[in-house]
Amino acid sequence: MKRAKKKQFHDFIAARGLKSTRQRDMVLDCFLSSDSHLSTEELYMKVRAKNSSIGYATVYRTLKLFAESGIAREIHFGDGQTRYEHVAEGEHHDHLVCTRCGSVQEFENEAIEKLQQEVADQFGFLVETHKMELYGICSKCRK
């Protein structure tokens, strides 16, 4: 999958007449090796640990390109930070967001997905995409 995402990104930037650079490739490798929902700052710190010459603006602009190319999705959890997550074809999940520590847990639930479709059908509504985020206190913070 990592190889397919790299190809998708490289094809995208080539089609836009942009250059494939070592810096972009390093940002891409750091992004694809992470399983979390990364802010620009968090990804910048990971990239900087590998190569201190890569600047914040490069990471910021490259993340925007990831979203435009379809390999990443921008997500907002109401804390004022934009985060990015991997986009996997045909995969869908929802989020549990802790309002104390900011942790984010992904989950899938077929019953919820089915109910959402039933509601849409009831109203003659065609769902193209959706997101569900539940906000509360995680089990660690509740202890």
Image: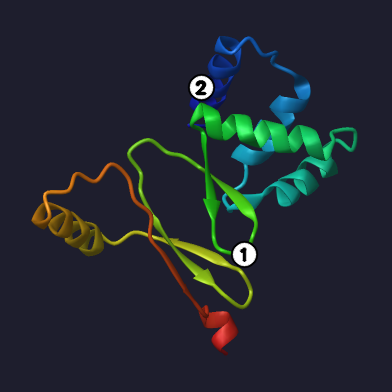
- Residue type at the position of mark 1: Asp
- Location of mark 1 (residue): 79
Which quadrant of the rendered structure holds the C terminus? Answer: bottom right
**Badge 2 density bin: few <14, some 14–19, many ≥20, Cα 10 Å:** some
Q: Residue at x 34, y 51 (%)?
A: 130
Residue 20 position within the rendered picture, expressed as x and y whole percent measured from the top left? 69, 16
Labelled disc at residue 65: none
Q: In terms of image quadrants, where is residue 50?
A: top right
Q: Residue at x 56, y 23 (%)?
A: 9
Q: Is residue 12 left or right of residue 26?
A: left
Is the residue under label 1 in contact with that under label 2 (CB below 8 Å)? no
Q: How is the image coloured?
A: rainbow
Q: In terms of image quadrants, where is residue 64?
A: top right
Q: Considering only vertical position in the picture, is 137 above or below 51? A: below
- Location of mark 2 (residue): 8
Q: Is residue 108 left or right of residue 120?
A: right
Q: Residue at x 57, y 50 (%)?
A: 35
- Among numbered discs 2 and 1, the one appearing first in the sequence: 2
Residue 74 position within the rendered picture, expressed as x and y whole percent measured from the top left? 54, 45
Q: Considering only vertical position in the picture, is 107 above or below 137? A: above
Q: Is residue 66 left or right of residue 57?
A: left
SS of the residue at dot 2?
Answer: helix
In the foreground, 81 or 91: 81
Residue 7 position within the rendered picture, expressed as x and y whole percent measured from the top left? 53, 20
Q: Considering only vertical position in the picture, is 88 above or below 9? A: below
- Residue type at the position of mark 2: Gln
Give the label, 2 or 1, closer to the camera: 1
What's the CA distance linking mark 2 and mark 1?
Answer: 30 Å
Q: Residue at x 51, y 68 (%)?
A: 97
SS of the residue at dot 1?
Answer: loop
